[in-house]
Amino acid sequence: MRWVVALMAVAAAAGLRFALDPVLGSAHPFPLFLGAVIVAAWFGGALPAIAAALAGYLVADYFFIEPGGFLSPRSAEALAGLGVYVVSSALIAGLGGAMHAARRRAESSEERSRADVTKQAHAAEELRSQREELRLVADTMPAGVVRVSADLRYVWVNRVFASWVGRPAEDIIGRPIVEVIGERDWRELRPHVERALAGERVEYERLARFARIGERWISSIAEPTRDEAGAPNGLVAVVTDIHVRRQVEAALNATREQLQLVADSMPAAVALCSRDLRYVWINRRYAQWLGMNAAAVVGRPIEEIIGASGGGCCGATPRAAHATPLRLTLRRRWRRFRARISGPTVLRT
């Protein structure tokens, strides 16, 4: 395309020179062709400008310089004009080529900049989309999720955690931990946070206090976040409400303690065994009968504690599970009678 522009510029200059020929005659044959050289240099650079200058010289020499013809002798004035034309064309080609190259570099840099801006816009949009997806996932979790920076400030929190502390998430982000949860809870939480910021995965349970829901048992897993160099720069924590579970465990432990007190006050030796014939629980009388500590007995097979022949004496045989209801009732009564006169009672789960 740039070569076509150069030839069209020469043709346009020649046409204009033909139009002015009645006025100019053989004088000033080259100035209009310098314009063609300028146009060629601007659009195509140095090489099209040189080509335009050469074509302009040939056209001017053949049509507008007297005597006509390429090999005709020239006057000193014509040679001086030719020298000026050559020097001017060379300067125009050099400067025009440099300007053309600079413009091309600027256009290329602008294209790269636009491409970079487009890539950055796509990357920013993808990052925003990923953050929205992460926010959606975090907000639908039944647990509290927080991210904390190295300077102990909340970077983001999910909806559940924000509801626990009774503040909007936007009001929590950027605030120090101690300002959100209070001095008392921060003193309990700080050792775990410091371990996570040192690069350690931390798991713990504690009784926390929240502004909106009060005291709750929580289980937390804190994982350190890292920068490009691999150094810890914060942490992400998932906090689960285990208050109901702890209450159930406490109630179960209390029931077990009451059962243990009742069983320990019984004069008979009583044991609870699993289907695989392992001790689940024994009372104090049974432990005394064995001459062992209850903790050392629980979980171990009956055969290991009282020997292979003792299983029948304790009335815990696998075939009992397949006995008829009448035979099973008779056997249980026989075991109770035998326990009164000779040994302990074993209950099978």
Image: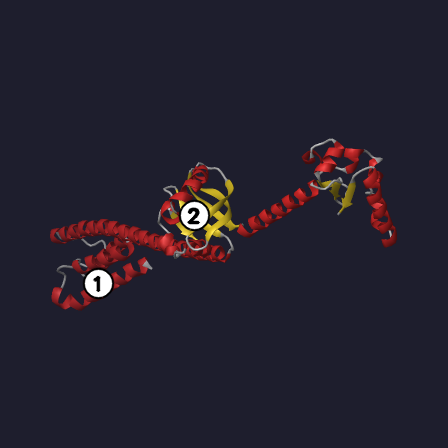
Residue 232, picture quadrant: top left
In this rendered view, identify the residue nearer to me: 168 or 63.
168
User: Considering only vertical position in the picture, is 334 above or below 53?
Assistant: above
Query: Mark 2 and mark 1: span between their CA atoms?
Result: 73 Å
Amino acid identity at mark 1: Ala
In this rendered view, identify the residue nearer to me: 98 or 172.
172
Residue identified by numbered label 1:
13
**Residue sitting at x 78%, y 42%:** 346
User: Considering only vertical position in the picture, is 227 above or below 168?
Assistant: above
| x then y, percent, for residue 50 | 26, 52
Using residue 41 as the reference point, say whether residue 251 is left or right of it. right
**Residue sitting at x 28%, y 59%:** 6
| x then y, percent, for residue 38 | 22, 56
Ranked by sequence position, the earlier of labels 2 and 1 is 1
Residue identified by numbered label 2:
147
| x then y, percent, for residue 18 | 19, 66
Depth check, mark 2 against mark 1: the one in front is 2
Amino acid identity at mark 2: Arg
> Would you say residue 66 is visible in this rendering?
no
Secondary-structure class at tag 1: helix
Q: Badge 2: how crowded within 10 Å, few (<14), some, or many (20+)? A: many
Secondary-structure class at tag 2: strand
Rendered-image quadrant of the N terminus: bottom left
